[in-house]
Image (cartoon, rainbow, N blue to C red):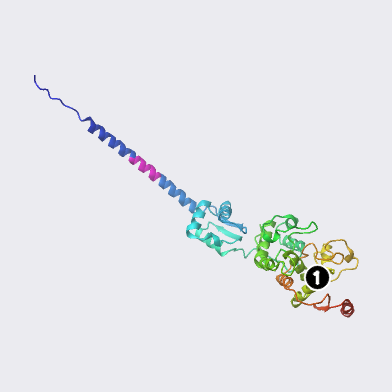
Amino acid sequence: MRNKKVIVKNTRTKRSGKNNKNNSNIKIALIFILLFVIVIGAINISNSFSQPKIKGEVNITIDKGSGLSQISDVLEENDIINSTTSFKIYCKVFSDSSKFQAGQYKIERPISMKDLTNLLIKGSNVDEGVKVTIPEGFVITQIATLLESKELGNKAEFLDLAKEGEFEYEFLDFDAPSSLKYKLEGFVYPDTYYFYPEATSEEILKVLLDTFESKVWTKLKTASNKNGYDYFQILTLASIVEKEAVVDDERAKIAGVFFNRLDIDMSLQSCATVQYALNKEKFSKVVTIAETQITSPYNTYKYPGLPPGPICNPGIKSIEAAINPDNNKYLFFVAKGDGTHYFSLTYEEHLNAIQKYQK
């Protein structure tokens, strides 16, 4: 029997080559997909870190206590940044958001993230716009009138917020008596401010309260209960000193007189409190006997102790005088007509001074 040659085809080699070719195609396809994803991702990342295409000036307010998330939201809402996430990443890597300051900003779009973060660290750049100077001793209604005369906000809305608005400040965390006219009376710090024309009453009040917090609150908070009076009582008395004093050197002396009266439960008998009770914006030098008889918790002729709250917005000198009153024993003082006062220990001496200086 003849041996037959058996020829076996190597199908494994062909099949293996085909599989390798398929695998190579898959790898190439995956590489193209990956590159596509990377390119698209790079484009998206680039876009998110770039500035929005919207151009033009925009005014924003960064509220006190705002964290990076809140600030990012404000920036995105005003088309200053494209992505809150990208802005946060940029701040974490290239800036320090803990140094960002509250305040009003005028921003020219587009703006780079570097310039934007540097601006937020530097602080408010609104030193132009509508200039408003609030004098020491202005009552809240005067301030509202002043702002409206500058075409800033709305007087009625401003006063409504001053009375019942909700503002997150430690110094406003007190139980307001029902007889209190305006909760924010006394807390509006007299100073020169700049506001952009579109500023709302709420935005304006936040700037005013921020200033009070930075320039006054620490002093008041430290002084609270030092002499048996809390910060609200001290501020209330400071507002009376503001309206009674003319010469700076007498502020602490006048404060001492009022504290002496409070210590012996003697009525303050301040004409200024009566005029506030009469809803006067601009106080006159004297009040009539009939006016001293009006029924109002602010009338310190008729009701002993301090009025329900401040009767104006005092300056720092009157506040410091109320914090550190002069240690005297006077119970009376009368205006001499030249801005100064004559101080008396007894009522008889006081009557003689009235005869001498107020003929």
From the image, which quarter does the C terminus lie in?
bottom right
Taking 146 as reference, is 11 above or below it? above
Q: Which residues are magenta?
A: 27-36
At 56% from the left and 59% from the top, the residue drawn is 108
Instruction: Left or right? Give the position of 276 relative to 57.
Output: right
Above or below, 344 relative to 29: below
The amino acid at mark 1 is Asp
**Could you say which quadrant of the image residue 345 lies in?**
bottom right
Locate residue 272, reporting x and y percent.
Answer: 82, 68
The residue identified by callout 1 is 263
In the displayed structure, 244 sits above or below 104; it is below
Q: Nearer the viewer, residue 343 or 275?
A: 343
| Of 298 and 280, the residue lying toward us | 298
Examine the rendering and report whether any part of residue 204 can be seen.
Answer: no
- Give the residue drawn at x 27%, y 34%: 18
- On the image, the x and y values in percent for residue 212 come to 68, 65
Q: How many marks?
A: 1
- Residue 144 in percent (x, y) is at 74, 61
Q: Give the main secondary structure, helix, strand or loop, of the magenta stretch.
A: helix
Q: Residue furthest top?
A: 1
Q: Is residue 132 left or right of residue 291?
A: left
Quarter of image, res 180: bottom right
Q: Does residue 215 appear in the picture of this structure?
A: yes
Q: Secondary structure at mark 1?
A: helix
**Residue 292 located within the stretch drawn in magenta:** no
- Among the 4 quarters of the image, the one containing residue 23: top left
Q: Residue 281: x percent and y percent?
A: 80, 64
